[in-house]
């Protein structure tokens, strides 16, 4: 399998590679929703459909050793990080071969330097602490913390921004503003400016309203470069669109609105830069990968309780 | 003779001296102030790069420590007053104690959260509570409480060495108290037995006299229970065995069952509120264990139990009200007499 993303900071990743990452996420998430519909997956999930340019653009701008703390909507981040779709599928199914033995499920995964948890805002001081640890160990690695527009309502976020700036921690706070916190539109939940929340704490802040992966990659590269170079926190605010429901069946938006935002489909925007042959090749490879991942995971055993814990 | 405060302070010095991964985080912990109760005094002078004074952000401090621990450091957090642990509940319950199990044992979160609890200093409703009961039973969390027995500093060192999150509860009134020495002074009449691992608890009884009841307690309340035990001997010729826990959660019930096998009467003493408290769990365990443990039936039909704890009220500022709300030596003596005479 071709590695989904390139990590070289100085060279713009190939258009094909970015497309491949986004398509992998799209097809994985579509499969997840289909598995829920057919009853083969239970529990809950939060898909990344519509936001793929964020993950592809950001993860192509970081170093493999950088530390990532993601949130409830973590599948796209994990796949763009280079995570194995099979291990993720197995985790969603609660199988022993899952990333964390079926203990965590959709929102609670860990692999290498990638971590996620399902509590809004609570992960932000933890990510700051990770940045402090990397700084004190002088590893040169930065930490990324993923927030949504809904996270802006949590008080502990502002404690974390304050500490990160006070202590000059190498951390990038990324807000993916998909304009809805579950069903609540951002206009009913967020007062004032999102960017000024970060600049008020004295950090460099970049903002993009785009679904073009090349725009996102450029902004992410600059933000990552600044954090690494200056040893200071920064904010990256990405306004995006979520095409699917917050979770599964909880979309209260009108069909007209959902249709209207389709013009921001990051895959369609970026596909114009690829040949038909390339697009077909990506579809074919990814279909095989997803099919293999879900079929193998489904055949895997469930975990057993251990005696000691 | 060193005090509990000196023992804890020396342990922090030793831990920071011997392991560069140890960090301290807390509010107002820098010298010359050295922390609200002076437990961290001298540390910022000796280790300026690793003692981090923080804004008033209890949740973030705890989260930062958790992140540091996930990435290989050994942070010790001071929460200035135990009352403020409500502010760290999400960090402890949904983050620090979750990661190891949730990530299938692939990570460790070796953090220590130290905090002074307890009343009797007239600090009023939000600076006098013993809130540890809210954290007892949280999976993945150890709750440890030192007393004047043994070495509180060694307990703290064991907490720092532990690879899981530890809530380390220090009663404010313990700080100036001298450490007790076996066979001397306060303990001259007592025979002492250790139980448990690195967070050792203690059983005490007067040599040569069969105890008629067991008093289970922890932390500062051992001071009250010891005074009550002395009064019970002097005034009423009733002998009690004291079982003093250091590890409150999770905990082993067997040391207590062994004592009850001979005394058959149990009194628990704590400073937290009575309802659904520490003593409630102790009594529940003792009751459950009676039928299936090979202890000769710790719990017989003629066995009786009582709990001494704070009234289920906020803790008043005014001294007479505070005294009425918190357990006293007299409360313990009276309950013990009622138990053994019933």
Image (tube, rainbow, N blue to C red):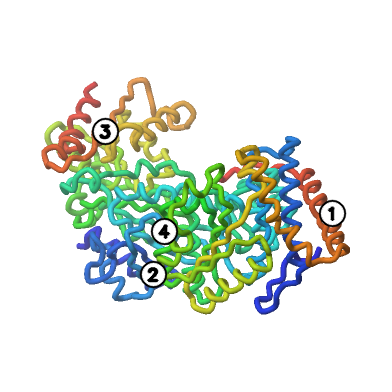
Instruction: Tell me the quarter of the picture where residue B251 sits.
Output: top left
For this view, does A264 lie left or right of residue B117?
right
* Badge 4 and badge 2 both on one subunit: yes
Q: Nearer the viewer, mark 1 or mark 4?
A: 4
Residue A40 visible (yes or no): yes
Q: Residue at 56% of width from left, 44% of height from top? A: A182
Real-space CA distance between mark 1 and mark 4, rounded to the nearest whole angstrom: 44 Å
Q: Residue at 83% of width from left, 53% of height from top? A: A287
The residue labelled by disc 1 is A288
Please report whichever mark, 2 or 1, sits nearer to the chain's N-terminal start: 2
The residue labelled by disc 3 is B312
Please tell me whether residue B80 is drawn above or below residue A309 in the rendered image. Answer: below
Real-space CA distance between mark 4 and mark 3, rounded to the nearest whole angstrom: 35 Å
The residue labelled by disc 2 is A166
| Subunit bearing disc 1 | A
Q: Are marks 2 and 1 in contact (CB under 8 Å)?
A: no
């Amino acid at each position: 399998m071709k590695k989904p993303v390139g990590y070289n900071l100085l060279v713009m990743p190939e258009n094909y590679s970015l497309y491949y990452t986004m398509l992998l996420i799209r097809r994985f998430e579509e499969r997840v929703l289909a598995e829920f519909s057919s009853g083969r997956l239970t529990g809950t999930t939060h898909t990344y459909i519509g936001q793929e340019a964020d993950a592809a653009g950001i993860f192509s701008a970081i170093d493999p050793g950088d530390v990532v703390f993601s949130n409830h909507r973590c599948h796209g981040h994990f796949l763009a990080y280079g995570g194995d779709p099979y291990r993720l599928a197995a985790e969603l199914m609660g199988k022993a071969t899952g990333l964390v033995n079926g203990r965590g499920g959709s929102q609670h995964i860990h692999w290498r330097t990638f971590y996620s948890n399902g509590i809004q805002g609570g992960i932000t001081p933890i990510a700051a602490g990770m940045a402090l640890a990397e700084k004190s160990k002088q590893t040169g690695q930065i930490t990324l913390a993923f927030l949504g527009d809904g996270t802006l309502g949590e008080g502990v976020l502002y404690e974390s921004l304050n500490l990160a700036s006070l202590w000059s921690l190498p951390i990038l706070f990324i807000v993916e503003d998909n304009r809805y916190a579950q069903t609540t539109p951002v206009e009913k939940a967020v007062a004032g400016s999102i960017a000024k929340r970060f600049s008020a704490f004295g950090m460099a802040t970049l903002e993009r309203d785009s679904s073009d992966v090349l725009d996102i990659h450029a902004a992410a590269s600059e933000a990552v470069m600044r954090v690494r170079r200056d040893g200071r926190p920064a904010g990256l605010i990405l306004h995006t669109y979520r095409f699917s429901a917050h979770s599964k069946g909880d979309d209260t938006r009108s069909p007209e609105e959902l249709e209207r935002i389709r013009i921001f489909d990051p895959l369609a925007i970026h596909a114009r830069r690829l040949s038909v042959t390339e697009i077909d090749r990506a579809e074919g490879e990814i279909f095989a990968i997803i099919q293999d991942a879900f079929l193998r995971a489904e055949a895997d055993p469930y975990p057993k309780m251990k005696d000691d814990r | 003779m060193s005090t509990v405060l000196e023992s804890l302070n020396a342990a922090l010095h030793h831990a920071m001296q011997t392991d560069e991964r140890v960090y301290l985080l807390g509010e107002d912990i820098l010298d010359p102030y050295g922390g609200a109760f002076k437990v961290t005094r001298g540390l910022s002078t000796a280790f300026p790069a690793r003692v981090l004074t923080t804004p008033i952000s209890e949740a973030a401090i705890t989260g930062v420590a958790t992140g540091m621990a996930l990435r290989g450091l050994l942070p010790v957090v001071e929460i200035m007053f135990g009352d403020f642990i409500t502010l760290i509940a999400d960090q402890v319950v949904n983050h620090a104690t979750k990661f190891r199990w949730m990530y299938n044992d692939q990570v460790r979160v070796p953090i220590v959260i130290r905090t002074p609890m307890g009343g009797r200093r007239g600090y009023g409703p939000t600076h006098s509570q013993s809130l540890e009961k809210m954290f007892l039973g949280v999976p993945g969390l150890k709750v440890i409480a030192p007393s004047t027995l043994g070495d509180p500093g060694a307990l703290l060192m064991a907490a720092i060495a532990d690879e899981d999150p530890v809530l380390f509860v220090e009663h404010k009134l313990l700080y100036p108290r001298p450490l007790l020495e076996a066979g001397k002074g306060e303990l001259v009449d007592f025979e002492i037995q250790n139980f448990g691992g690195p967070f050792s608890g203690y059983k005490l009884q007067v040599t040569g006299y069969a105890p008629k009841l067991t008093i289970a307690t922890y932390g500062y309340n051992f001071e009250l229970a010891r005074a009550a035990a002395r009064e019970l001997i002097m005034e009423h010729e009733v002998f009690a065995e004291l079982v003093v826990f250091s590890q409150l959660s999770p905990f082993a019930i067997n040391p207590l069952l062994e004592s009850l096998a001979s005394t058959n009467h149990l009194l628990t003493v704590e400073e937290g509120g009575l309802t659904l408290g520490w003593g409630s769990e102790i009594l529940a365990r003792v009751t459950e264990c009676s039928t299936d443990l090979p202890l000769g039936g710790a719990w017989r039909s003629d066995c009786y139990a009582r709990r001494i704890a704070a009234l289920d009220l906020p803790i008043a500022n005014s001294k007479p009200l505070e005294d009425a709300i918190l357990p006293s030596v007299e409360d313990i003596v009276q309950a013990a007499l009622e138990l053994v005479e019933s």
